[in-house]
Amino acid sequence: MSAEQATAWFAGRLPDGWFTASPEVTVDREEILVVGTLPDLTDEFTDAAARAAAHAGRISRFREQTRDERIEIARQAEHRFGRKVAWGATLGETTELFTVLSVPVMTRLRQPERIVLDTLVAAGVARSRSEALAWAVRLVGQHADGWLGELREAMTRVEDLRNQGPDLD
């Protein structure tokens, strides 16, 4: 199952009016994350904090009002794609994710890598090695976003070429 297939399915399945455009659909081995942009607020706000609070409130309202329908859509998608579905919404600068998975990942680290994690824990950046590793992965993702995007594009091209290959059956 490709991200394109999931994106197309959700585009056809989601109710009109939930989002201002097609949602961003991200797929990995365990989960499909669907994040849509909500319509802008028309109210005027005196400062950024008031605007952020209003955005958070609107996202919370969307979450409550669409809960039953999102659960039903997620159930159908989980049956179709064999992955859990998580949701999120964006309004202005505020993005909130709902019901996302936290998947354990096993890794082997040598002492130099463990020392990095332990330093982050000792400095109070993280509460545990697990949290420190997640922090480091997020940091790399932020700073290497362009390179990771190029890598994903290359992987997609390789998958396309494999699919065009000869049928050996």
Image (cartoon, rainbow, N blue to C red):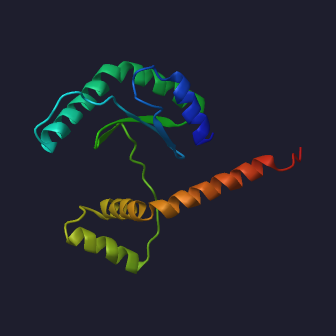
Q: Residue furthest right?
A: 169
Q: Quick one: 20 or 53, which is closer to the camera? A: 20
* Residue 47, quarter of the rendered image: top left
List x then y, in percent, for residue 134: 36, 59
List x then y, in percent, for residue 14: 48, 23
**Image quadrant where one finds the N terminus:** top right
List x then y, in percent, for residue 66: 35, 21
Q: Residue at x 28, y 23 (%)?
A: 64
Q: Is residue 47 left or right of residue 12?
A: left
Q: Is residue 74 left or right of residue 131?
A: right
Q: Is residue 90 left or right of residue 154?
A: left
Q: Is residue 156 left or right of residue 33?
A: right
Q: Quick one: 117 or 2, which is closer to the camera? A: 2
Residue 33 versus residue 12 in the image, above or below: below
Q: Residue at x 70, y 51 (%)?
A: 159
Q: Quick one: 62 or 30, which is closer to the camera? A: 62
* Residue 3, quarter of the rendered image: top right
Residue 126 versus residue 82 in the image, above or below: below
- Number of numbered discs: 0
Residue 85 versus residue 169 in the image, above or below: above
**Image quadrant where one finds the C terminus:** top right
Q: Residue furthest bottom?
A: 112
List x then y, in percent, for residue 27: 52, 43
